[in-house]
Amino acid sequence: MNKNLNKIALTGLSVDKKHEEIIKSIVDILLKEEKKILIEDNLVNSFDSLRKYRSSPDQIEKNCDLLISIGGDGTIINTAKKYGIKGIPILGINFGSLGFLTDIAPDNIKKSLPSILKGEFKIDNRSFLQSKLNSSLLKQKALNEIVLHSGAVAKMIEFDVFIDGEFVYKQRADGLIVFSSTGSTAYSLSGGGPLIHPDLNIIGVMPMFPHSLNTTPIIIDQHKKVRIVLNKIDSNQNSELSFDGQENIDIKEGSSIEISKSKEEVSLIHPLDNEYFFGCRSKLGWGKSILE
């Protein structure tokens, strides 16, 4: 990756008016460092003073060395699929709650951003997951997880799971989460799944509310393929396949889904002093007393 960051784009799904001063402070830093500024349409629309930097997605894709994603992890996932998957590195400014991917808090912008613009940063490459439905490759990608679920509240599905063609088990459950190491801090974590360091290149497989007393998450090498055969749906509607909770497609009974690592990656940019386990301690409350 080229560390000469001269053309900087700002993007975000939506930003509250109260964040205007923070965004202006980012722009001021970029101007001071003599960087070309591009701001995505939907972010500019919130602030009249920034309209002169308005840029289309096509302009950003063709004229950008670094994307600054303003929002939470959901925003940076959307940005990763729109721009990062095409090779543009992403820096996250955290306006969300947890923010495992967006690790610069608004209070640290003035400290961290100038150093990053000078090339002082770490590069963190993350893989996407892809899937095939009945042997046809789907266009949707996932950075966190692909989830097969019943599509209805308190309804179960029955499915078979295979890994690299080897039968693993037949399961009745609300669904199945197939997650990356990035996704281990997302949906699977809320279901009691393991926390996986992002340096480990794995795929995780975890049933959702299984009708079993002895089911545990399975961790496999990222080059293996997970195939799910949907045998039965306990409702009158189709099951669904969900990609990072942002896109959903209907899945019919009898369908076969194959999930594997995609060749596409996204490069996340972190300050040099960024520490993974500090983020875990501060965001997951590790080591805190119940009296605090």
Image (cartoon, grey):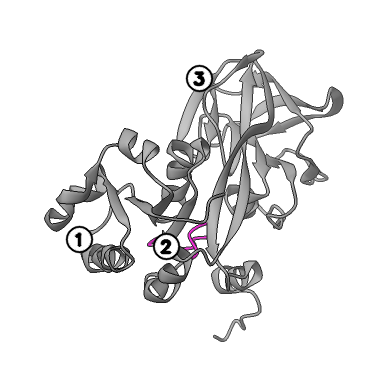
Q: Residue beneath label 1, please?
A: 17
In this rendering, would 245 be left or right of 256? left
Residue located 36% across and 41% down the image: 63
Whether residue 84 is situated above or below residue 109 in the rendered picture: above
The part of the image, by quadrant, that contains residue 291 is: bottom right
- Pointer 2 or 3: first along the chain: 2
| Depth check, front residue: 58 or 275 | 58
> Residue type at mark 1?
Lys
Q: For marks 2 and 3, give the one nearer the viewer.
A: 2
Extreme residue in the right direction: 166
Label 2 Cα crowd, 10 Å radius (few <14 / some 14-19 / many 20+) = many
Q: For the stretch drawn in magenta, what is the main secondary structure?
A: loop
Please, what secondary structure does the residue beneath circle 1 have?
helix
Q: Residue beneath label 2, please?
A: 94
Residue located 50% across and 64% down the image: 103
Label 3 Cα crowd, 10 Å radius (few <14 / some 14-19 / many 20+) = some
Q: Which residues are magenta?
A: 95-103
Whether residue 68 is situated above or below residue 126 in the rendered picture: below
Please, what secondary structure does the residue beneath circle 2 have?
strand
Please, what secondary structure does the residue beneath circle 3 have?
loop
Q: CA distance from mark 2 to mark 3?
A: 38 Å
| Depth check, front residue: 291 or 221 | 221
Residue located 18% across and 55% down the image: 50
Q: Please tell me the numbered disc located at residue 129.
A: none
> Residue type at mark 2?
Asn
Q: Please tell me the numbered disc located at residue 237.
A: 3
